[in-house]
Amino acid sequence: MTALVTLGETMAVLAAERPGPLACGTPLRLGFAGAEATVAIGVSRLGHAASWIGRVGADSAGTMILDGLRGEAVDVTRARVDDAAPTGLMLRERRTPDHTRVTYYRRGLAGARLDPGDIDPELVARARVLHVTGITPALGDGPLAAVRRAVDLARAAGVTVSLDLNYRARLWNRQEAAAELNHLVARADIVFAGPDEASLVVPEADPATMARTLLGLGPREAVLKLGARGAVAVTHDGEAVQDIVPVTPVDPIGAGDAFVAGYLAGHLDGTDLPGRLLLAATCGAFAVAAPGDWEGLPRRAELDLLHGADVTR
Amino acid sequence: MTALVTLGETMAVLAAERPGPLACGTPLRLGFAGAEATVAIGVSRLGHAASWIGRVGADSAGTMILDGLRGEAVDVTRARVDDAAPTGLMLRERRTPDHTRVTYYRRGLAGARLDPGDIDPELVARARVLHVTGITPALGDGPLAAVRRAVDLARAAGVTVSLDLNYRARLWNRQEAAAELNHLVARADIVFAGPDEASLVVPEADPATMARTLLGLGPREAVLKLGARGAVAVTHDGEAVQDIVPVTPVDPIGAGDAFVAGYLAGHLDGTDLPGRLLLAATCGAFAVAAPGDWEGLPRRAELDLLHGADVTR
Amino acid sequence: MTALVTLGETMAVLAAERPGPLACGTPLRLGFAGAEATVAIGVSRLGHAASWIGRVGADSAGTMILDGLRGEAVDVTRARVDDAAPTGLMLRERRTPDHTRVTYYRRGLAGARLDPGDIDPELVARARVLHVTGITPALGDGPLAAVRRAVDLARAAGVTVSLDLNYRARLWNRQEAAAELNHLVARADIVFAGPDEASLVVPEADPATMARTLLGLGPREAVLKLGARGAVAVTHDGEAVQDIVPVTPVDPIGAGDAFVAGYLAGHLDGTDLPGRLLLAATCGAFAVAAPGDWEGLPRRAELDLLHGADVTR
Amino acid sequence: MTALVTLGETMAVLAAERPGPLACGTPLRLGFAGAEATVAIGVSRLGHAASWIGRVGADSAGTMILDGLRGEAVDVTRARVDDAAPTGLMLRERRTPDHTRVTYYRRGLAGARLDPGDIDPELVARARVLHVTGITPALGDGPLAAVRRAVDLARAAGVTVSLDLNYRARLWNRQEAAAELNHLVARADIVFAGPDEASLVVPEADPATMARTLLGLGPREAVLKLGARGAVAVTHDGEAVQDIVPVTPVDPIGAGDAFVAGYLAGHLDGTDLPGRLLLAATCGAFAVAAPGDWEGLPRRAELDLLHGADVTR
Amino acid sequence: MTALVTLGETMAVLAAERPGPLACGTPLRLGFAGAEATVAIGVSRLGHAASWIGRVGADSAGTMILDGLRGEAVDVTRARVDDAAPTGLMLRERRTPDHTRVTYYRRGLAGARLDPGDIDPELVARARVLHVTGITPALGDGPLAAVRRAVDLARAAGVTVSLDLNYRARLWNRQEAAAELNHLVARADIVFAGPDEASLVVPEADPATMARTLLGLGPREAVLKLGARGAVAVTHDGEAVQDIVPVTPVDPIGAGDAFVAGYLAGHLDGTDLPGRLLLAATCGAFAVAAPGDWEGLPRRAELDLLHGADVTR
Amino acid sequence: MTALVTLGETMAVLAAERPGPLACGTPLRLGFAGAEATVAIGVSRLGHAASWIGRVGADSAGTMILDGLRGEAVDVTRARVDDAAPTGLMLRERRTPDHTRVTYYRRGLAGARLDPGDIDPELVARARVLHVTGITPALGDGPLAAVRRAVDLARAAGVTVSLDLNYRARLWNRQEAAAELNHLVARADIVFAGPDEASLVVPEADPATMARTLLGLGPREAVLKLGARGAVAVTHDGEAVQDIVPVTPVDPIGAGDAFVAGYLAGHLDGTDLPGRLLLAATCGAFAVAAPGDWEGLPRRAELDLLHGADVTR
């Protein structure tokens, strides 16, 4: 049975590994990415059954995505192959080691054609956690309605609703985003946000204060992701802070989603708040220490690797 | 001064070099392609000034395309960077050594936003040849109008109009294509087509007959490209056939456009019909003997390479 | 529900892609291979549920294999992670384009530790086809007993037993092999063999004769794989021959197993003998037209690709 | 019209990307490099027309260099293809991440055959800046005479003369260099040097003092490049210092030339001294943050990337 | 004549260069490694004749190893090609930039089949140094007996015996190791150990104290390798400490063996203790600054590279 | 003791593996090549001790060459590191799969600085065969004198002199070559030539006739290499013809030198003429079936691979 259900867009990624401008002849590597896919994979690698709902095109990229998710033991039986549009795609230039520049091909493409009919009520109702992000509602009316329906179904069934604000300035402006995200925050149980994202729905303040203010909007847990400064989480029972787990950085993309995966896996494990945050930070560190959004995510047996135990010998 | 002007869509290409299905981790190489770009580069490498008119996005792929064309000494001063849409892109899977499978990302993107205002009347009027293809009119109303306007300008100025039918079944159906291509053939001086493409505007028959029938529609030269069987050309002064120039094949894509480039370069050279066809076939062979659509196109000094002269020693 | 169950050894493969002797610095690519895994993937890609039973080590190679099979929608829920030995591995040198040289690391390793207890009786009993090969019995007493038990279970449940003789001279000699394979042939419904392999159990003769003699030993279908000369199949209802489907060859390894996959998928489709052989030959051709043992195997929608329909346009 | 003219040697580069000693099978990447080419490309990417004068061989490397420069919109119409000698080349070993070891093939080769007849007087006279380096005079009598002639032409036409001392110990000794560079400094308007290079013509002192002493020799601007410590510039109107712009370093080669490109582009922009130095340091940082000498140089729209503005979202 | 003789296991290495989990399609590079091979190569690159005794299989990997060692001028005329077992192999995943995970294929393979008969008494007797490690005795009875015999032969001939404890927890437990290593330490002249390894034979204490205690067991020199904290050495004539030589790290594997190579080369040079330690630390730094175990080891002329002298210009 | 001594130039090779014009970013692979080096390696791999005399520069390429030869068990103790000039180099473009285009950097470089003093009289006198080529005399006065001296020494000592005409039109013209080669042919025992090369010293005729005419000039064996048509050999005792051994071609370069290696190894084996020619043709086939000049050369145990015996199983 599925422990976590998530829905959203998963796109093909064409990523240059070497820093520098794209040019004729630049070698790239094919992969896939999506905030929700990363969460699903992260949770699955830590041993909890995860399902992903979304659409891909009837093309090679779509096949690659479904095979890739299935290979990671993410259930894709409710994912849909939509032959009316190709799979979305992003072209990633690594302009410098620290600055990635992405061209998106997603408007009107398969992933953005998600609609409420794609949400299987039974799947959601039987899960323990539903995870949604602020990206999906920004993709269009269908995806927005799909997120709302999934949240409604989850709430009706007593399933925990997790929301990562994930504001994407290219997809909508702050006003549009604030309106919808306010609505979603009020219906979520767990909310993740960066400080700038949080300021869409609560006044700017220090992270802990913003987290506390978020709690006042409805959720029972609010987690502020602070990048290199770690994270702070507030629940009705208490608060906790967490430093990052240090690693030699390879590719920062996906760290925030990896963090969410770890946190939610901790939830499914039944771990306490500091334990959830530590697992979250550990997953974030693993994501940073390998190329790709999700490729570096840890399996359960690898977690000690970043905490002193030497698995090499 | 520009000898050849062409207009159309140039897209970024992400091509797998190894045969087999795309998968996570498949290495690809970035490049660009477009039937008209190949013709422009081919003509330029053979020593005649060529200009390309079209649009790219204000992104890394657009920069790559303009730099690449400029590097090939193709004039891109009239190409336009359109910041309203990203550069079109194609993802090329080499399913087997002999079967390429492409997903296109072009609808509504920069290349398809070409419009008549992009055509510089002076540039066209001063050229010796205008080359257009049947791809551009299929991209939308703007590109269709742009092609019509370019042809009008050329005819008004006495510039030779070259047309490659280049029927693309994914973009329009045979009825739509036939209507527009009939119109264009009637206004062209030189027409290139495969037998199947020619059958859009003339009755099916043996290639030479079809070429002769094409002449009846208006052009003064009709060239049928027959793939591995070579080519046949008919003019008001006579006819000629040409075998392919044998090479070890590497990548067949672009061979037809390379053929056109060679033929038109022969025109600009003032070569007779057999000479034009030989140059055309030689260019086609060079294109086939290297990866990419245009990368293998010959420079003037290299032409002997496939005709026995050993440039290696 | 599983349509096909198979069991055997799947090993990590480290394969040089460029021909030539291995040397310091030679680039290799990681993958996995196993005759039965190829059959399972081939059947799965053609739309029939397949299960693989076997053991991998508790290491990165083992994870890669299980993820890879699962990604191909092959059920691995009965595969076992054995922490007592590492995953088997083969190092593949491509000495010339036509001569591969392999060093095997399999003796005593996880895959060879398969035993009868690994066979889930219910899984076998509910399948429509059980496929085994002559490799597994040669791996040791445990694997031999596992194959016997699987065949017993299948026969008891009326499940079709498919056997590919797959004689491996490095694992056992012809006398040992003949003894065991005779026993297995007698208990199989469908038998696949090359002429040399068939001669382990029937007198040497022309392929059709050997196939007919094989039928006399028990099976109701005997298929002789003749490499570049195609295949011949004999059943109680008739005989059929099949030429190879021509492609530009890339990597011949895995073609025989791909052939079996296609034949068995045809069985599961309910296709007649010529149809099964055509599907088998088509799968073999796809395998040859891409690197790797199974990577090139076709999905249902791709089958036409090698039969004239152009899926490229 | 050309804003900047430069002349010198551009060589093919064969560079190992991975650190470690060169060995059989080491992968390398082809490119090109030259101090003046980097300056021309840098200025061109920032939007000012640049011309490069020099010679390449009638070979593939020569074609690559001219195509590459032209692709960067550097005017190469006055560059000469010299069929009497091959294009110069350098083989770059990255012995450790921080130590590059180069074998040069340049003596007597095309680039070193530059002579005064290659300098187009009109091109120089119409430019706003002529940039020369201390490398060219060290290449032989012809190049030395060419530099002198270019400087004479510039001075006669009131064109600003920029000189980067660029002392190369492999090409001449300090005595020879000092004699010629003294002469050139006296005739330059803007002088760039590292402290050690500056000490060829002025007494060793702190950088600002050396820069001031340089001014006394004739130039109206003296810029000392201090590597990781930034730069200091002195003009008749004032002085300024500039820290480096911090980036994760990838390849330090070319940073000094990138700095010059930025400074001269600032000149052509009409920016004040601190603005020129900031642009210089930004260009240096971009060069360091990508492999290759010039590949990472910024376009105008990218400059903010290293100054906090996020172009990724 | 051989200056240094060493014996042990050299295995093929299949190493992923990019960090992250191994997956289908991961590119790897073939090489070889072994603690004693690294010492032999290091000593040989510094100009002293070195011999390696050991076994490889009659396969491509074995050929690669012998060719590789011979290419490094290590004498392999006493190495043996054992056709009874394949060459040992290790598969190296770089899980993060700082955590390598290795699967070994060595049990029962060629390298572990070393026996006392492989030791050429004359070769040992004529050498100046015999170097052995604590890995070999852990590989089985044959290798253990071979090490004992080599040490006996060396002592009988007055050849200096060098021992690196090199404890491998995967091969034996601390009790087994302690028993055998105690015996070997007592018979060695020079002993190398990390603090944890030293604690197998002497009580835990600060490094210098442990080194001094080691001297009491028999050796005349004890060197503690302290990783990032450098090294400390104690002899009957005095003590010395050495910091690491700083470099940008690429691959830490092999640094300890490189250190030993440098130290022993210093011995063969006749350098004093601080000189030996500096050479040791320099070799360690070179090993860290390149991929691979031994590939980055310095030649005599390169030593200054890390000490300020610029060999680039 | 050395069975074969050879002398000549060995250069670094930078070779593009993919067909097509060189461009910025083209990946290349480093190696080395030289007609005599290929012969030495081929003979060594077949089990006969071989020595190479020549010069490399005191640079990374020189080290790579000596390490590479030594790794192949070719004695390089008489090779000289010349610090007055860099190692020669060639840049190889694979313009099409069948047309390689090379730029040479060899004039005045280390390999061309060979002189008679480099020839060790004892080494030559103790060998069984001295092999020289027509390339070396064309490199300059020193190399010419060195070849003459080596031949004199060999003849004086009764050592068999082998000569491959190897005419290089880039190095000298036919008149110059004919004069010197005539002289060398008269002093050689075994002569190898292509028909065009043979025509430098004997009248054009069918190959067998030319071979017979060559015998009349002094040698006791004349072998005409006929490319795809095989070879014909004439001795005082008889004649023999040999077809090529068919393989899938990868890289034809080096096939002629591989042929010579096989022929001379057959000589050292004491094989009869047909046997020598078969070994020669087999070596040529192996060279063609792998990239690089010498990398694919066979070891003794591999010879059967191309003659039906399957070493794969």
Image (cartoon, coloured by chain):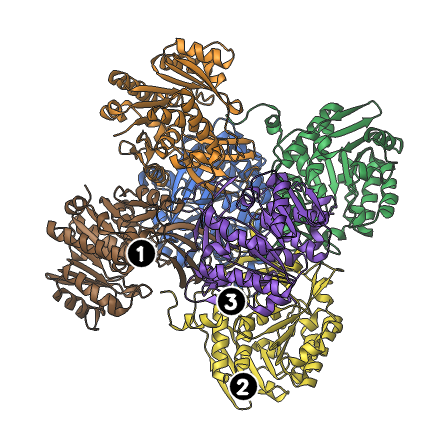
Chain colours: A brown, B purple, C orange, D yellow, E blue, F green
Disc nearest the viewer among 3 and 1: 3
Number of marks: 3
Q: Name which residue lies at 67% across and 45% down.
A: F99
The answer to whether one can see residue E253 in this image is: no
* D47 shown above or below A282: below
Q: Which residue is mark 3?
A: B118
Assign a secondary structure to mark 1.
Answer: helix
Hey, which quadrant is residue E103 in on the image? top left
Label 3 to label 1, Cα distance in Å? 50 Å
Find residue E276 and report its horizontal and vertical position in percent: 51, 56
Point out which mark residue A285 bears: 1
Residue closest to the eye, C100 or C303: C303
Q: On the picture, is E34 further left or further right than A301?
A: right
* Residue at mark 2: chain: D
* Neighbourhood count class around disc 3 (C-alpha, 10 Å): few under 14, some 14–19, many 20 upward: many
Assign a secondary structure to mark 2.
Answer: strand
Label 2 to label 1, Cα distance in Å? 47 Å
Q: Type of residue at label 2?
A: Val
Q: Type of residue at label 1?
A: Ala
Find residue E138 and report its horizontal and vertical position in percent: 39, 36
* D28 shown above or below E86: below
Q: Which residue is mark 2?
A: D234
Label 3 to label 2, Cα distance in Å? 48 Å
